[in-house]
Image (cartoon, rainbow, N blue to C red):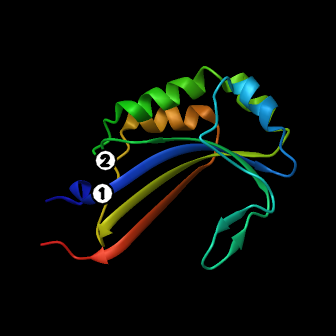
Amino acid sequence: MTSLDKINHASLALMVIGANLPMEEITALLEIEPTKVVRRGDIINKLPQMIAGEDEWVYGQELESPQGRDEIMRGFLEKLHSRREALNKIKQYGEVRLRLRVQSDYAQMAYCLMPETLSDLSGLGLPLDVTSISWGEIGL
């Protein structure tokens, strides 16, 4: 088993973060329904209790293939490329970024991004957060 086989969950999200975000306007500009909306003051975690400090408009998708040939990711990035003008307008409301999240039960994991995916990502001109969550089990 390779480290690429040990991923339980991977997702990619477009995030708009700021104060008093005009959620409906962001949705209309992007022509994408958010998968999650958080308003400042919302409880985002119960134990320990965490309160959102800012508004968040999020559009995320679960990914399928950690080997870098994920068609869902390619489609996601193509959709964003077709909305680059809208993304630039939305930057006036807050911070716009992408987040790649990878989760595994194992301590050693990797998510491969192919050169064409890296090119698509850089062409958007958005920051990319990469987060990994590992429960630390060592596979044999």
Circles 1 and 2 in contact, beta carbons < 8 Å = yes
* Residue 66 badge: 2
Q: How many marks?
A: 2
Please provide percent x and percent y for residue 1: 13, 59
Task: Give the class, few, some or many, for how many residues have Cα within 10 Å of label 2's Cα (few <14, many ≥20).
Answer: many
Identify which amino acid the numbered label 1 is placed on: Ile
Residue occupying image coordinates x 40% and y 51%: 10
Identify which amino acid the numbered label 2 is placed on: Pro
**Residue 30 in the figure: left or right of residue 110:** right
* Residue 7 badge: 1
Please provide percent x and percent y for residue 110: 32, 58
Please provide percent x and percent y for residue 59: 60, 39
Which of the 4 quarters of the picture holds residue 23?
A: top right
Residue occupying image coordinates x 51% and y 24%: 78
Residue occupying image coordinates x 64% and y 41%: 126
Between 39 and 139, the one nearer to me in the picture: 39
